[in-house]
Image (cartoon, rainbow, N blue to C red):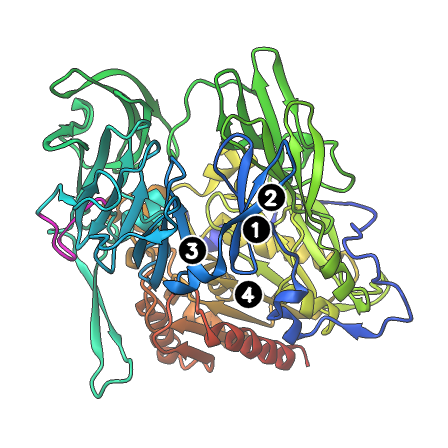
């Protein structure tokens, strides 16, 4: 690895070409109306009526869906167009329920109450079972409070749940639960739910068990955290003495959880068989990446080597006595591998974002193929007849689309999320015609009709041979001849994307509308959805190109002529807070100030799965770890104004990270500002959320004064 300083010089020496989209996208129609004097205020940022609405629905068959409105749930039949009340508000209120889950046979409902958040995805809740035939709650339900995960079987009305880190199965509502596992112990061994690092970085879910398609079997994972080191932090609360939160949290180069996969017969829970990891990985550290049932007796499991550059997709068949390995797919990469891909059915200079639906003869997927727009999204259908785009021409000025299909894909909810104001409709997939409008956001249009709103400009910058995209919120009445302050809104993590075609109303809307600040986002090297070559540029070297490219892009924005070079700032959250801090510590002279929220400061402090995916273990890439800390750049903060923000109960990016930055700046006698939020996690929820944006607004006003 060359030093960061040498890399900076090399990048600044590259010829940079700027390509502008000549006409800004008019995402708001009233931005130049001289009669309109109102602007989008900071209060509006937190007013839900000043944001576009989505449309909630749950498909329960190929032609019926449920929609919650006014506290009740309504059943809609698409072919007939008729609707009826399915669950009343009074029934929800009887259990003080906030949500529900319907059994596959549509005979029972599990009402959810007493929600208690744990980590990003996980929570505990109480589940009350309701008989739709008798219209009565089942008593006793035999389901304890503080259930950690709950799921109905895909057929019938069996159910399974996790309580106190053990798996239980109930054959039918009203029956007593049967305990499957007995080894569960908090922070040591978890059955059927992932530990912290698997939930956050591998599964993106609190789910750790999976029903087979007909409900005969349950596959469940066992997470052994016995050897995993723990992070501890204070929970201040309201008591006389603070308590201590302890979480098994593997960091780079330290012991990982040991994971095993089992399958239990739901009708005979004594029949449990381990699904054994392939021999190639049996003697090396590895991860369980995903579990997918193919048929009732066939399960596909993805196993990933700890370095995350070698993946095995193994198919297992049930022989009557065990789950035997059958065919498999093996993938290796010179970079990192996500959860794997099977045989390609498409090709081109664009990416398949996700698989939306698979039927007997078709595959529906989301991609950014249309129009050469990496930040766009459209829905495609692949079949033996070829590939067609379902959403490319449905609506004008609609380049960010998604679809949610009914069970056999006869219908789908189409969501156009930008660049125009979001629009949701019900589509007939047999002829791709709109059946009816679900939400056109007419109310939002009315609420913002008398407000001067920003416009959005999108364009590209060519750096080191790559065409890299940016977007800018431009103030109302924007004029090229004027000079505006600039705020760079950065994330820049591996495979991220901030310059896209989605319509957004957020803090940047206020800054552009009321404060006349241009807010720009830019996707440099390491960003996603433009191929592995660009994305893997930062492999084994976080804190280099993705940082430098933000500086390079900002220099080019200044050259456009409408940026006040003396009023340029940068801000980001999480990885964006890290990049913000690294940019400000680069000594570039481009930025006057910046705000870092919950930043990483040293990669050895973050979790193993995420960090090693991009940086390997420290023993294999020590120089890159050493050269990528914020603390090493502390002396360069004398020339910038810096606001450091963190929650004391951040289970993800620990308060330790901000504390280390603070200590380094103090040692260098750097005058900086800091704000902490007591007992708040990585997202700074509740009152802290409004407070942090208000605080940053005031900081920015002082910086740009």
Q: Main secondary structure of the magenta part?
A: loop
Q: Quadrant of the C terminus?
A: bottom right
Foreground mark, 4 or 3, reads 3
Q: Quadrant of the N terminus?
A: top left
Which one is nearer the viewer's eye here, 37 or 12?
Answer: 37
Residue placed under numbered mark 4 in the picture: 571
x then y, percent, for residue 436: 71, 40
Neighbours of disc 3 within 10 Å: few (<14), some (14-19), many (20+) = some
Category of crowding for the residue at label 1, using alpha-carbon neighbours closer than 10 angstroms: few (below 14), some (14–19), many (at least 20): many
State left or right for residue 88 relative to residue 468: left
The residue under label 2 is 83
List x then y, in percent, for residue 259: 18, 40
Label 1, label 4: how many angstroms apart (C-alpha)? 15 Å
Magenta highlight range: 183-192
Instruction: Say few, some or many: other residues with alpha carbon within 10 Å of mark 4 (under 14 / 14 to 19 / 20 or more).
Output: many
Label of residue 549 in the image: 1
Tag 2's secondary structure?
Answer: strand
């Amino acid at each position: 690895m060359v030093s960061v300083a040498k890399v900076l010089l090399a990048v600044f020496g590259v010829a940079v070409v700027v390509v502008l989209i000549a006409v800004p996208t008019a995402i708001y129609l009233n931005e130049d109306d001289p009669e309109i004097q109102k602007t989008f205020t900071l209060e509006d940022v937190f007013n839900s009526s000043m944001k576009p609405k989505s449309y909630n629905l749950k498909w329960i068959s190929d032609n019926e869906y449920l929609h919650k409105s006014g506290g009740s749930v309504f059943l809609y039949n698409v072919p007939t167009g008729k609707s009826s009340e399915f669950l009343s508000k009074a029934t929800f209120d009887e259990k003080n329920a906030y949500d529900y889950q319907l059994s596959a046979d549509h005979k029972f409902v599990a009402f959810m109450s007493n929600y208690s958040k744990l980590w990003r995805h996980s929570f505990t809740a109480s589940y009350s079972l309701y008989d739709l035939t008798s219209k009565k709650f089942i008593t006793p339900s035999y389901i304890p409070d503080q259930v950690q995960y709950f799921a109905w079987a895909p057929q019938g009305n069996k159910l399974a749940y996790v309580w106190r880190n053990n798996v239980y199965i109930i054959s039918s509502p009203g029956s007593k639960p049967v305990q499957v596992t007995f080894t569960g112990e908090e922070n040591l061994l978890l059955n059927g739910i992932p530990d912290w690092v698997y939930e956050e970085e591998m599964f993106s879910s609190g789910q750790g068990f999976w029903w087979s398609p007909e409900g005969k079997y349950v596959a469940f994972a066992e997470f052994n955290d016995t050897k995993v080191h723990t992070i501890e932090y204070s929970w201040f609360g309201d008591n006389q003495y603070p308590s201590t939160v302890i979480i098994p949290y593997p960091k780079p180069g330290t012991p990982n959880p040991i994971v095993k996969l089992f399958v239990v017969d739901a009708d005979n829970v004594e029949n449990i068989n381990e699904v054994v990891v392939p021999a190639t990985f049996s003697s090396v550290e590895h991860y369980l990446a995903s579990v997918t049932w193919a048929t009732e007796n066939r399960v596909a499991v993805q196993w990933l080597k700890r370095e995350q550059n070698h993946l095995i997709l193994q198919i297992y068949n049930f022989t009557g006595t065990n789950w035997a390995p059958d065919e498999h797919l093996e993938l290796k990469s010179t970079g990192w591998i996500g959860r794997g891909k099977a045989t390609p059915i498409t090709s081109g200079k664009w990416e398949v974002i996700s698989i939306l639906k698979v039927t007997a003869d078709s595959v529906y997927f989301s991609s950014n193929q249309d129009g050469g727009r990496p930040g766009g999204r459209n829905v495609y259908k692949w079949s033996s007849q070829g590939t067609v785009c379902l959403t490319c021409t449905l609506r004008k000025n609609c380049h960010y689309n998604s679809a949610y299909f009914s069970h056999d894909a006869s219908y789908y909810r189409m969501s156009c999320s930008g660049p125009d104001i979001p629009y949701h409709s019900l589509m007939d997939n047999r002829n791709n015609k709109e059946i009816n409008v679900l939400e056109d956001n007419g109310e939002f249009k009315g609420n913002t009709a008398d407000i001067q709103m920003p416009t959005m400009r999108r364009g590209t910058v060519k750096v080191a041979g790559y065409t890299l995209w940016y977007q800018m919120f431009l103030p109302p009445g924007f004029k090229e001849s004027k000079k505006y302050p600039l705020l760079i809104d950065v994330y820049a993590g591996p495979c991220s994307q901030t310059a896209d075609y989605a319509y957004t109303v957020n803090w940047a809307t206020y800054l552009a509308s009321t404060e006349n600040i241009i807010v720009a986002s830019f996707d440099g090297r390491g960003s996603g959805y433009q191929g592995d070559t660009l994305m893997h540029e930062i492999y084994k070297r976080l804190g280099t190109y993705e940082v430098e490219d933000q500086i390079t892009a900002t220099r080019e924005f200044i050259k456009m002529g409408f940026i006040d070079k003396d009023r340029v700032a940068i801000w980001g959250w999480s990885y964006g807070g890290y990049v913000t801090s690294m940019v400000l510590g680069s000594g570039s002279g481009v930025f006057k100030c910046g705000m870092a929220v919950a930043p990483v400061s040293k990669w050895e402090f973050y979790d193993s799965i995420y960090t090693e995916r991009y940086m390997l273990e420290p023993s294999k890439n020590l120089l890159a770890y050493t050269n990528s800390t914020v603390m090493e750049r502390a002396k360069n903060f004398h020339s910038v104004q810096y606001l450091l923000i963190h929650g004391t109960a951040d289970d993800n990016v620990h308060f330790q990270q901000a504390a280390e930055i603070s200590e380094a700046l103090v040692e260098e006698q750097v005058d900086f500002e800091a704000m902490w939020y007591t007992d708040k996690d990585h997202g700074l929820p509740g009152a802290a959320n409004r407070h942090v944006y208000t605080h940053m607004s005031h900081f920015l006003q002082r910086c740009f004064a």
